[in-house]
């Protein structure tokens, strides 16, 4: 009874915090005047995602207003701004940029469409949605089919993630899928952009390039290399460098020119599970690894594991800025309540309800607490259930549902 009372109080307080963030212009990133007064692209859609579980009309309206604000300040080339101060119109350029603003913007529209079925709103904003995807496709500067992200150019705005980044490309898959789904509900004469590489192609590329999992059948490995070579010779060369690590129970956080990150990015991997990029086999390995190394114990989920220390190849001296990214802090292995909520959702998706309920007393951020609580009690995952239902048939057919791939014998 005590636990139930705590959870009820937590839901109430989370709901109230989100309401304090809601404005006529959308969700501010903080309810505190001295915090973040701006409407941030990614933060507002994450807030919207948690808000839909409440059914609160005021919060739904704030999510819709967030999309309106983002559309109004979209650049002529299609960039969705990292953040906008709705009181002054000021757009901050402090950070390296944010490729994920466009990604969350498209997904926010998909969430709104599935929630409201408002065809007029979708039609009115479609030119902005279409332009946002076109802008994203131009971030694929070498036309490999994946986004090339500048260093620190996403939510990890003080971290040396770069080039083909897991987090951004998982959302890129989801955004392409959402774009195609929404396009089916537009008038026949509506101009609709057709990407050079569709969601299925992005899904395939992520799993070919960023998941290192070799069975002991030489022909299978040879086929994998030939597929990489046929898409991009650069990846074929890179994969030879990756051979030293043999395998990993998670997607690599980023890969670049002859180099790659070798640590677990929790948000990127959890989103891979939730969007359907990861099949059962990969999901099982990711969640087992996160449990084995204690990525969510005793507090909400750490951003990465293991953290990066001074002297390591991926260390940057700018991690010392305001002491933010020292080991076990901020993006460098610090805990993030927002990620914790998505961790619970991923556990529910995979059927690990006991683990999901065990995290229930941890302190998530307001929006993701509501989302995690909704997932545990209903088994439903707004946005991500729809994305999974829309997963390309060929991607579904390629899924592996065994924990171990061991044909031919040898170590596993």
Image (cartoon, rainbow, N blue to C red):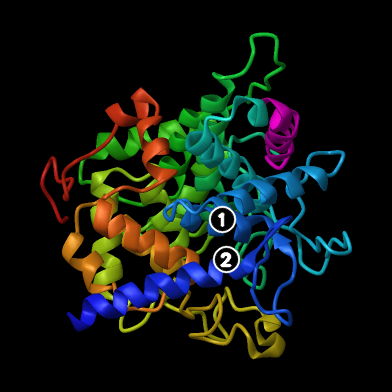
Q: Which residue is mark 2?
A: 19
State the residue lying farthest toward the front: 57
Q: Is residue 263 visible?
A: no
The x and y percentages for residue 102 are 67, 46
Q: Is residue 309 above or below residue 305?
A: below
Is 189 or 33 nearer to us in this picture? 33
How much space separates mark 1 and mark 2, taking CA atoms? Answer: 7 Å
364 vs 381: above or below? below
> Looking at the rendering, which quadrant does residue 376 occupy?
bottom left
The residue stretch that appears in magenta: 123-140
Residue displayed at 61% across by 36% down: 144
* Residue 74 horizontal/vertical position (percent): 80, 44
Residue tagged by mark 1?
A: 59
Q: Is residue 90 above or below residue 105?
A: below
Neighbor class of circle 2 (other Cα within 10 Å; few <14, some 14-19, many 20+) is: some
Left or right for 321, reference 118: right
Q: Position of residue 17 (x, y in %)?
A: 54, 72
Residue 288 appears in the figure: yes
Q: Earlier in the sequence, mark 1 or mark 2?
A: 2
- The reply, left or right, for residue 277 in relation to residue 199 is left
Residue at 24% x, 51% y: name it.
Answer: 350
Report the number of numbered marks.
2
Q: Residue furthest bottom?
A: 323
**Which residue is nearer to you in this view: 229 or 141?**
141
Disc 2 secondary structure class? helix
Residue that sits furthest to the left in the current view: 409
Magenta: main secondary structure equals helix
Point 73% across, 82% down: residue: 34
Q: Quadrant of residue 185?
A: top right
The residue that appears at 12% across and 41% down in the rendered structure is 408
Q: Position of residue 60 (x, y in %)?
A: 56, 50
In the drawing, what numbered circle is on residue 92? none
């Amino acid at each position: 009874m005590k636990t139930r009372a705590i959870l009820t109080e937590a839901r109430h307080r989370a709901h109230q915090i989100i309401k304090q963030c809601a404005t006529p212009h959308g969700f501010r990133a903080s309810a505190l005047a001295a915090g973040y007064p701006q409407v941030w692209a990614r933060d507002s859609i994450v807030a919207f995602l948690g808000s839909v579980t409440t059914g609160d009309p005021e919060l739904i309206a704030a999510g819709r207003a967030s999309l309106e604000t983002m559309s109004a300040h979209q650049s002529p080339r299609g960039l969705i701004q990292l953040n906008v101060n709705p009181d002054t119109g000021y757009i901050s350029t402090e950070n390296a940029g944010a490729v994920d603003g466009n990604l969350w913007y498209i997904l926010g529209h998909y969430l709104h469409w599935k929630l409201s079925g408002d065809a007029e709103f979708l039609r009115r904003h479609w030119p902005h949605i279409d332009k946002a995807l076109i802008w994203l496709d131009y971030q694929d500067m070498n036309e490999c089919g994946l986004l090339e992200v500048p260093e620190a150019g996403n939510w990890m705005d003080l971290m040396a993630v770069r080039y083909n980044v897991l987090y951004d490309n998982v959302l890129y898959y989801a955004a392409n899928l959402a774009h195609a789904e929404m396009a089916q509900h537009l008038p026949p004469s509506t101009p609709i952009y057709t990407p050079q590489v569709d969601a299925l192609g992005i899904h395939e590329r992520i799993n070919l390039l960023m998941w290192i999992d070799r069975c002991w059948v030489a022909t299978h490995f040879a086929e994998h290399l030939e597929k990489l070579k046929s898409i991009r010779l650069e990846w074929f060369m890179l994969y030879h460098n990756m051979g030293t690590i043999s395998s990993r129970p998670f997607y690599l956080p980023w890969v670049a020119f002859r180099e790659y990150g070798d640590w677990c990015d929790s948000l990127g991997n959890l989103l891979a599970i939730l969007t359907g990029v990861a099949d059962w086999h990969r999901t099982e390995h990711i969640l087992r690894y996160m449990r084995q190394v204690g990525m969510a114990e005793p507090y909400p989920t750490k951003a990465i594991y293991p953290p990066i220390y001074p002297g390591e190849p991926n260390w940057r001296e700018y991690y010392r800025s305001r002491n933010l990214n020292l080991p076990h802090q901020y993006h460098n292995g610090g805990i993030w309540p927002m990620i914790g909520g998505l961790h619970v959702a991923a556990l529910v998706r995979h059927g690990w309800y006991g683990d999901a309920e065990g995290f229930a007393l941890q302190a998530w951020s307001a929006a993701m607490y509501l989302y995690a609580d909704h997932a545990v009690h209903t088994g439903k995952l707004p946005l991500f259930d729809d994305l999974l239902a829309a997963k390309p048939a060929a991607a579904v057919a390629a899924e592996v549902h065994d924990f171990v791939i061991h044909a031919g014998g040898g170590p596993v």
